[in-house]
Image: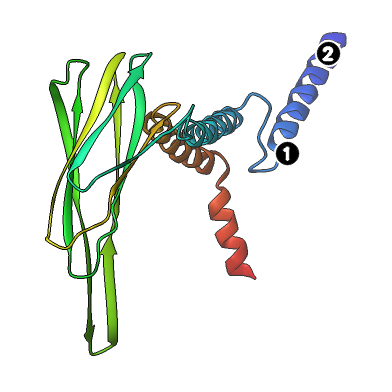
Amino acid sequence: MEEKSDLSQKYLKGQKMKTEKRAVPLGVQKPGSKLETLTQIAIALIAFGSICLISALVVNFSWGKSISKSLPLQGGIVGPIQVKKDRTVYLVEVFQRVSYGQWSSVTGNVLDQDKNYLFGFGEEFWAESGRDSEGPWAESKNSYKMKMTLQKGTYYFEFESERSRNVSGNITILVHRKRGSPLPFLIAGIIALIIGVVVNEIANQTFTKMIEAIEVD
């Protein structure tokens, strides 16, 4: 009799445990469940992505003293520029005022310490105006930017200009040293955020619930 009683108690205890397991509401995550793990991964990815995007903004700031020089119409040389570390990022800004109906093409050449040509860049400046069916209009371009990564060494920037006859504005050059390139941080941040949002949606259906709540309202 005692053995039967023990068996009955074990059976009732087992049935109670099964009932308690079934009583957990749907959608409620148990500690250590797969959904909880996915949620933690999503939070980590979103946090990492946010840090990368903030880092991209920080490294894009200028670092140290900028170089400013005004060159004559025909151009000139800026430098020497001492680069103390490999893979140092520089931003070169070029400005020139051009009157309406005029144009100017300013080309920059990067030279090494012996003033040998390494690579070049350049764009055109122009200004136009007129009148159409909507009234008078005016468009112009008087600046451009070039970002580059330089290795340790000494460099010069040489500028040359071709222009229409009546261009009279000097060429202004600004050279900024940056903390680094924001591109790797930007790419990593965007990818991490996208994956984090997708994983969070799989685990919690956040956007689905928001849409359903909006539809109900």
Q: In the displayed structure, would residue 121 be above or below residue 12?
A: below
Secondary structure beneath dot 2 equals helix
Q: Can you tell which mark lies on residue 6?
A: 2
Amino acid marked by disc 1: Ala
Location of residue 19 in the rendering, given as x and y in whole percent from the top left corner:
73, 34
Q: Residues within 10 Å of mark 2 (few under 14, many from 20)?
A: few
Q: Which residue is depicted at the point 19% across and 59% down?
A: 167
> In this picture, is 202 found above or below 141?
above
Q: Which residue is mark 1?
A: 23
Near-viewer residue (70 or 116):
70
Query: Which quadrant is the N terminus positioned in?
Result: top right
Vertical order, 90 against 74 (above or below): above
Relative side of 192 to 88, left or right: right
Image position, residue 210 (x, y; %): 59, 57
Residue sitting at x 70%, y 42%? 25
- Distance between mark 1 and mark 2 Cα atoms: 26 Å
Q: Is residue 106 left or right of residue 41?
A: left
Question: Which mark lies nearer to you, 1 or 2?
Answer: 1
